[in-house]
Amino acid sequence: MASSGSGYDLSSSTFSPDGRIFQVEYAAKAVENGGTTLGIRCSDGILLCSEKPLVAGRMAVPASGRRVHALSSYAGAAVTGFLPDGRQVVARGREEAAGYLDSFGAPIPPTVLAERLGSYVHYFTLHGALRPFGASTLMAGYDTAEKRHSLHMVDPSGMSYEYYAAAAGRGRQSAKTELEKLPLQPGGAGVTLERGLVILAKILHMLFEEGRDKPFVIEMGWMGVRTGWKFSAVPDGLVKAAEVEAKKELEDEEGEDDEGEEMEE
Amino acid sequence: MASLYAPPSLRQQHDGKSAETRNLKPGEISSGTTIMAVCFNGGVVLGADSRVSSGTYVVNRVSDKIVQLHERIWCCRSGSAADTQALTDIVKHHLGQISIETGRLPTVAMAAHLMRKLIYGNKDNLMAGVIVGGWDPVEGGSVYNVTLGGSCVRQPFTIGGSGSSYIYGLVDAECRSGMNADECNAFVKKAVSHAMARDGSSGGIIRTVVVTEDGNVRSYTEGNKLPYGP
C-alpha cells in the first residue's frame, strides 16, 4: 500500500488530512526491517527469542550486540528494529522498574511497566523536536503479588497490548501464522517452556532463506517456574540443542511432504 | 562525691522534660501518646489514646490519632502532630495514585515503605513515629512499626509512643498467638489503659479500628469505662 505523505509527514506533531501520523508509520517500517523477534506465553513461563543476523561481519564477536535484555529481576525485554532506539527503551524500562522498587518497596507489576514504557515511547510521537522510536519491544514480566506471568509488546506508536504470543520484525507475518496454530488461548493445552524453545527455533529456521538472508544467531531469554520466575538468558547449550531439534523436525516434515507427493503418483 | 556542677551540654539534656517534649520546638504540639496494633488471622486491630498535649496543657483530650491511608490501610500517629499529619497526607496521596495506576489495592508493606522513606529521608527535621497496619490481598493482616529514625519492622503486634514504655512487660506477658478479633480488641484496650494510667502524656479515651477484608469498624471506649485506671 503506497502512502504518499506529501507534506504531512515531515514532523510527528502533524496529522495528515485522513487522521494519520506518518512519522509513526514510518517508524513502524523501521521495525519491519529488523530481525524477527518472537515471544510466547508458555504455561510455565515466558520465552523471548530474537533472530540476530550477523551483519557486523566476521570480525565481530557473535555474542555482542544483544537484543534480549533483563529489565529487573522479574522482567525482561527483546527489541527489534532500530536497535540503538531499542536500547533506549530498555534503559527506561530499567529505570522505571528500579524507581518503582525504590519508591514502593515491591517489584513493578508487568502491566504497569508495559504501560509506562508505552507512555514513554508515545511521548516521542508528539514532540516536534524528537523522532519516534524505530523499535518494538517485547516484554516478559512476572507479577509477584498476583503470581501471574505476562507477555507484552510496545510498538513505536506507544500502544501496548498483552499477548499470548507476539512477533515483530521481518518475518512477523509468517511467524504469526505459525504462532496462531499453538494452543495458547485460555482453555487450550498450553505449551511448555521446553517445547517453546524448539518451536521458536523452528519458526526462525523455517523463515530463513539461503541467499536472501544473512546467516544468523538465535538469542533467547526466559523466565519461568524453572528460573524461580527470574529473567535470564537461556543457556547457550539449550539454545543450540533446541536448534538441532528444530532443524531435525523441519527435515522430517519436509520428508513427509515428499512422501505424500510420491504416493500421489 | 559527685560534682554538683554539670557542664552546659549535660545540663540541657536533663531538665525534667520527657524525651518527647525535649525535641519539640517551643509551642509545638506533641501527640505524647500510646499507640498499638495487633494482627489476627484475617486482619488487624489498631488502638490509640486521645490526648494531645503542649507541655502540660492538654490541647485536645478526644483527638483521633488513627488515620486512614487507604481503603484497608490505617496508621497510628505519635510524636509531633504537625509532622505526622503532613506525613500521612503525603502517603495517602501516593497510595491513592498508585492504586489507580495498578488497578489493585495497595499493600500494607507498600504504605509502610513509603512512610519509612519519608521519615528516614527527613529524619533531621521530623519527629514522627508511626504504626502502619491493615489488610491486603497479598499478606492478609499485617503490622509495621516505623520508628523515629526511619527503621521499618514488621511484627505480629507492636506498641509505640511515649506511653508504650510502661507496657512492654504487660504486652509480652499477655500476648498469645492465634487470638481472634475480639481477643485482640480486649488485649489492645487493656494494654492502652495501663499505659494511660502511668504516662502523663497519654489519656482521654481509647479509639480502636478493626480492619478486615470485609471492612473497617471504628469504635471508642470512654475514659471512665476503661478496663484499667483510676
Image (tube, rainbow, N blue to C red):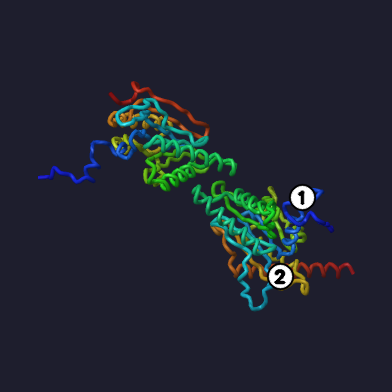
Q: Amino acid at mark 1?
A: Phe
Q: Is residue B15 visible?
A: yes
Task: Return the residue found at the far left.
Answer: B1
Of residue B212 and residue A153, the one placed in the foreground of this image is A153
Front-lying residue, A211 or A7: A7
Q: Position of residue A103 (x, y in %)?
A: 50, 48
Q: Residue furthest bottom?
A: A59
- The residue at the far top in this view is B224
Question: For residue A166, which quarter of the picture?
Answer: bottom right
Q: Residue at x 59, y 65 (%)?
A: A234
Q: Earlier in the sequence, mark 1 or mark 2?
A: 1
Identify the residue under disc 2. Answer: A248
Image coords of residue B206 (percent x, y): 38, 27
Query: Looking at the figure, which quarter contains the N terminus of chain A?
Result: bottom right
Label 1 resides on the chain identified as: A
Q: Which residue is mark 1?
A: A15
